[in-house]
Image (tube, rainbow, N blue to C red):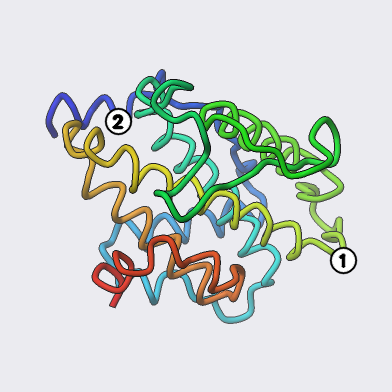
Amino acid sequence: MSMALKQVFNKDKTFRPKRKFEPGTQRFELHKRAQASLNSGVDLKAAVQLPCGEDQNDWVAVHVVDFFNRINLIYGTICEFCTERTCPVMSGGPKYEYRWQDDLKYKKPTALPAPQYMNLLMDWIEVQINNEDIFPTCVGVPFPKNFLQICKKILCRLFRVFVHVYIHHFDRVIVMGAEAHVNTCYKHFYYFVTEMNLIDRKELEPLKEMTSRMCH
């Protein structure tokens, strides 16, 4: 592994602290199974399919937390190059601009510089996944009825991080020798959200051409 690539996995570079699963819980076992599938080099399309007999919400919860951690790490490696000067708007090229809304401080969709948008996004997701009423960790505690809708919103917004990184900062990813890692993470994410029907096709449009080449 090159020194540049080691930096990508340096824990100090992580944008946010990781949310982890408690050993001994069902979700921890699912997390281990998902990780083992990835580490074994298995076909990513097969790896994202819901295991027979497992609960869909548990499977989605494990992946949402995992993608948050991974995408966090990816953005953390390039965040010093994503500034209000280089990225005055949160965008994916000239055709796509993303505006922030959280029903708290930003009650209407608001144009923001990319780094500010990213900070708000990661804070917002962190609050969701650490909320026991949304992502319960105790055995037997049910997921809320709107759990999948919440996850769809989280995943949709995480996809925008990929859009921004690929379109505006991929040169830095290449310089760091992290291209293969980021591409694998993207493919894993894409196969999962499409397999589980968790993202609208129109949201995937900004990376449509790249995806058609990368994800057969």
157 horizontally vs 81: left or right = right
Residue 28, percent from left and from top? 59, 50
* Circle 1 SS class: loop
Residue 208, percent from left and from top? 38, 68
Q: Residue at x 59, y 27 (%)?
A: 116
Amino acid at the residue labelled 2: Val
Q: Is residue 162 above or below residue 80?
A: below
Q: Is residue 31 above or below residue 105?
A: below
Q: Nearer the viewer, residue 21 or 173?
A: 173
- Neighbour class for label 2 at 10 Å: few (<14), some, many (≥20)? many
Q: Are marks 2 and 1 in contact (CB under 8 Å)?
A: no
- First of labels 2, 1 by sequence position: 2
Residue 61, quarter of the rendered image = bottom right
Q: What mark, if any, has residue 145 been given in the picture?
A: 1
Amino acid at the residue labelled 1: Lys
48 horizontally vs 138: left or right = left
Q: What mark, if any, has residue 8 been given in the picture?
A: 2
Q: Nearer the viewer, residue 86 or 35?
A: 86
Quadrant where the C terminus sits is bottom left
153 horizontally vs 28: left or right = right
Q: What mark, if any, has residue 62 been given in the picture?
A: none
Q: Is residue 173 above or below residue 153?
A: above
Q: Residue at x 16, y 32 (%)?
A: 175
Residue 188, percent from left and from top? 40, 61
Quadrant where the N terminus sits is top left
- Neighbour class for label 1 at 10 Å: few (<14), some, many (≥20)? few
